[in-house]
Image: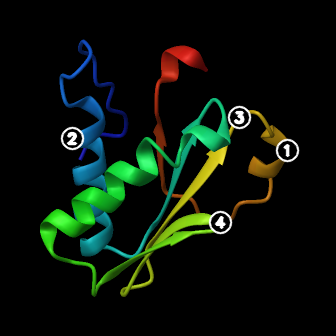
């Protein structure tokens, strides 16, 4: 229930896994839109998107959460969604509506 969370730890300390799992569980509970940001958009596919796909599969909720690969997005049966953007094209961040959660991956790069 905190407004901000900063996860700090070394390589392999499960920071990304923790936030990805928490994000999915929150969006299953409440209809919300989350935005996942990395420095470069193209790096999402092998990192954040792949991790979220893996968690959806591991939880066995493929029938409730759909993973779309073009453009990258996860949509939930309850209307929640996860969008992916990169800071390499910041003008594309201006018109996104109704974002209530933001995950900044590798924020030290930003």
Q: Which residue is mark 1?
A: 91
The answer to whether 87 is drawn above or below residue 42 in the figure is above
**Rendered image: mark on residue 18:** 2
Q: CA distance from mark 4 to mark 1?
A: 17 Å
In percent of the image, x 23 and y 52: which residue is there?
21
Graded by Cα atoms within 10 Å as few (under 14), some (14 to 19) or many (20 or more), the crowding at tag 2 reads: few
Which of 38 and 53 lies nearest the eye of the viewer?
53
Q: Of tags 4 and 1, which is closer to the observer?
A: 4
Q: Residues within 10 Å of mark 1 (few under 14, many from 20)?
A: few
Q: CA distance from mark 3 to mark 2?
A: 23 Å
Secondary structure of residue under mark 1? helix
Q: Which of pointers 4 and 3 indicates the residue nearer the eye?
A: 4
SS state under label 3: loop
Q: CA distance from mark 2 to mark 1?
A: 29 Å
In this view, the residue farthest toward the front is: 46
Q: Position of residue 76 (x, y in %)?
A: 39, 79
The residue that label 3 is drawn on is: 87
Cα distance between the residues tagged 2 and 4: 24 Å
Image quarter where the C terminus lies is top right
Q: Please state the horizontal and vertical placement of residue 9, each as a whole percent of the image.
A: 23, 15
The residue tagged with tag 4: helix, strand or loop?
loop
Provide residue 78's location: percent of width, then percent of height: 36, 86
- Identify the mark nearer the N-term, 4 or 1: 4
Relative placement, left or right, of 108 versus 6 is: right
Q: Is residue 85 left or right of residue 100?
A: right
Circle 1/circle 3 CB separation < 8 Å: no
Q: Which residue, as the protein is rendered here, is positioned at the far right?
A: 91
| Image-quadrant location for residue 8 | top left
Residue denoted by label 4: 71
């Amino acid at each position: 229930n905190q407004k901000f969370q900063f996860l700090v730890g070394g390589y392999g300390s499960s920071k990304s896994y923790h936030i990805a799992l928490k994000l999915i569980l929150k969006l299953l509970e409440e209809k919300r839109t989350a935005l996942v940001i990395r420095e470069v958009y193209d790096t999402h596919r092998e990192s954040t998107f792949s991790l979220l796909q893996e968690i959806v599969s591991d939880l066995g909720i493929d029938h409730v959460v759909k993973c779309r690969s073009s453009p990258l997005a996860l949509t939930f049966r309850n209307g929640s969604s996860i969008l992916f953007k990169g800071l390499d094209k910041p003008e594309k961040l201006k018109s996104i509506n109704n974002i209530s959660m933001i995950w900044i991956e590798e924020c030290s790069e930003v």
